[in-house]
Amino acid sequence: MRIALIGNPNTGKSTIFSALCGVPTRIGNYPGVTVEKKIGAYRDAQGEVQIIDLPGTYSLAARTLDEQVSVDVLLGRQADIPSLDAVIVVADATNLDRNLYLYSQVRDLGLPTLLVLNMWDRVAQESIEIDLETLKKRLNAIIVTTNAARKMGIEYLRIAIRQAIEAEMDSTPSPLPKPLRERAIEVQQWMATLSVKEIPLPWIERLILDVGNQGLEIFAKNHNLSELPTKITAVRERLAAENCRVPTVETKVRYQWIREILADVVRRPLHEQLTWSDRIDKVVTHRWCGMLLFALVMFVVFQAIYRWAEPAMTLIEWVQAIAGESVCTVVPPGMLRSLLVDGIIAGVGSVMVFLPQILLLFLFIGALEDCGYMARAAFVMDKLMTRLGLSGKSFVPLMSSFACAVPGIMATRTIENRTERFVTILIAPLMSCSARLPVYLLLIGTFVPATTWLGGWVGLQGLTLLFMQSLGALIAVPIAYILRKTFFKGDMPPFVMELPPYKWPSLQVLFFRVWERVLAFITRAGTLIFCTSVIVWAASYFPADRSKIHQLETARENLETELSALPKSERTTDPATLAQIALLDSQIAALASEERVLGGQAIENSFMGYAGHAIEPLVRPLGWDWKIGVGVIASFPAREVIIATMGTIYSLGGEVSEDDQGLRDALVHASWPDGKPVFNFPVALSIMVFFALCAQCAATIMTIQRETNSWKWAIFTFVYMTILAYFGAWTAFLLASNFT
Amino acid sequence: MNLADLKVGQRGTITRVNGEDSLALRLMEMGLIEGEVVRLLGTAPMGEPLEFAYRSSRLSLRKQEAVRVEIELVKDST
């Protein structure tokens, strides 16, 4: 059984999907386009039911990619989804008029259609009365009422799905005018004379009705019907003469039909009622409160990410240390141990440590989206965004890019206007994504003093983090302006946006959303970052001769074992033992310092060392040494790799002394040949600015290529951001060096 | 008179939506059709966009879009 789930945005469609299927079994894209394909499944007594979740849409008039794909799936045109057994239309019960519009379009496609009235609890709350029995009769349909957020009605829905599949086809006529059907039959017959496989009438009707979409050209091309567009234009002209002007006739007749169906079925107060949601809006969109609240929300989110994740991060670091130590007790010094400890554990571990923060960020963004605040943010920010030639609709994709540019760029699909969509895509990678967070956290935590004010609520580190997180967005302002004045000239596209009522975020939906993202992050850490760690390790390990270092390590570890057999110096007063401890300590220290010197030489004589030295003249103006240069080179495929690379380089370089706890200490102790420390505040700032502005993410570049369907814009993004990053880092270094 | 002429709190009855382009169509699909009573609920902090209420829907439009919807002022609306 294969069922499609469709509905207007903000009807709780995702909540119904989660309540029916739990975690989706498959998430991906439809082939060739970038519309999200989400499929789930559940079992009932009669077997498996597969649910295909279609993108939220107000209409099937295919103007956006999302709508086009929905129509294709419903018509069985989508190659990878075989024909459907039924369609579920999810409607907001308090907004039946508008929601029945999509229902009537879907029903006309000729599939068994089931109507779900979700958010049924709100009907009574808003003093609306709905006569369900009459509605069922008039629509000749199976109707289920649900309150998916509380999982009410889901069992009935499962039963109704079975009933809908088995029920007789609804024979009530379409509200579309007769001439349209007649013209569609003519077109069908004309196609038959050209020996085209029979195309169902609803499909032809949609081709006639959807003025100005690309579906027609694609259809004509696929079926080798070069005359079709001319034919359809002629049909439209004829329909206009018959008093059925396409496309306005569709909204007219469908709403006429909806009024007839709903007459005496829905009783509502004479005027729209002010709900508690409106009262919240009075504050949220208020002249001052609105702006203040917006700033406050952003501030709290970033402060919380920094503070709440701390305990979990400590735990992950501890696990990583234990893992490294246990490998050392089993594997003797040598290439294998180095690969395991310095390559894999250090590399993957140093990325995993940021999992708690990434989880929190996705949690916040998901919750803000689900409770309805994101739409208000778009509403409040729209005027500001229009100054850049964008709209409030670009706001949510850009905001999502703060978690990750890939879903952010994918979210631009809801922007109908091409110009606005492309500009949004090109600036989205400037938003500070969660992969930049580790770099900021590491460098801020190490080089920015932990000064706090107001009893610990406002901290310098948190403020610096806020600045780094905002930098890309600030730079995006002039970039968007320039793009709108050069490559993307044009009028301001229209703005039509629904403001859904506020609701408590659905924990289940939130959980799955966070879970998906976290899983994707772990998969990346397990594959891409794992591979990069090993490659970077190998490039820093070979071809230098390290046998001497491994000998020293073995000798030092033997002495350490000897030392641990003795009692602790503070526990004994025996002069002989104390003398022996002092001797062993000094021998161990001598060996360790020799290891460090040799290690430093070894990494300079590795492939990575050669590459780093080659680019050193280029990165010197930014205040970087060749090791930082190496880290940056290695992190072009995925920016979070920098931490792993630095971890690998510094532990291999032997600069991690015995008492060092981790990478932070290694960075503090890293020094130029003359002994001056490499890292100070200006250097840390220059690295952070570089990471803030650079397009170091292969996944983002590929997504831009896919979404714009051209390599041109992908390469353009990469080039402009790299140039921006280099000069940004340079400026930051110069400014910071002069003022500190 | 059109939707952009409403003052906050006032209501208007839609008489027609001008044009046949995709914007006009989208407005009609969203339920802004002849006979619907629409109230201006408020505006965004910087004066635009506008927030309209009709039935249980809350829709935001800029002035540029709102002028496309012609209305008759409902007299006793405050």
Image: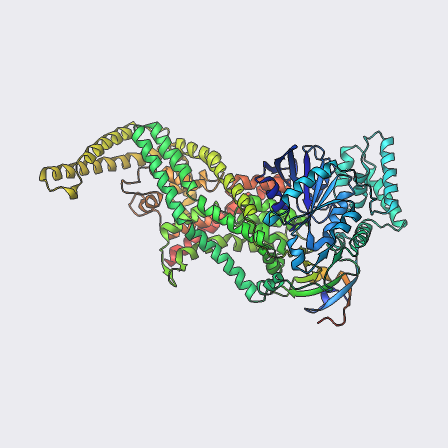
- Percent from the top left, x then y, of residue A102? 73, 48
**Residue occupying the point 10% across, 37% down:** A576
Task: Specify the quadrant that holds the N terminus of chain A.
Answer: top right
Seen from this angle, which residue lies furthest left? A575
Say if residue A652 shows up in the picture. no
Q: Out of A417 and A254, give the one closest to the viewer.
A: A254
- Percent from the top left, x then y, of residue A275? 64, 62
Residue A214: image quadrant is: top right
Seen from this angle, which residue lies furthest right? A242
Q: Out of A296 and A172, give the one closest to the viewer.
A: A172
Q: Is residue A481 left or right of residue A462?
A: right
Task: Specify the quadrant that holds the C terminus of chain A.
Answer: bottom left
Q: Across the whole image, how many numbered discs are drawn on residues?
A: 0
**Residue occupying the point 10% across, 40% down:** A574
Q: Out of A666 and A261, give the one closest to the viewer.
A: A261
Residue A616: image quadrant is: top left
- Percent from the top left, x then y, of residue A418? 67, 48
Say if residue A413 shows up in the picture. yes
- Percent from the top left, x then y, of residue B19? 79, 56
**Residue occupying the point 67% across, 32% down:** A80
Q: Is residue A510 left or right of residue A190?
A: left
Residue A164: image quadrant is: top right
Q: Out of A675 and A121, give the one closest to the viewer.
A: A121
Q: What colour scheme was applied to this rendering of the protein?
A: rainbow
Q: Is residue A171 left or right of residue A92?
A: right
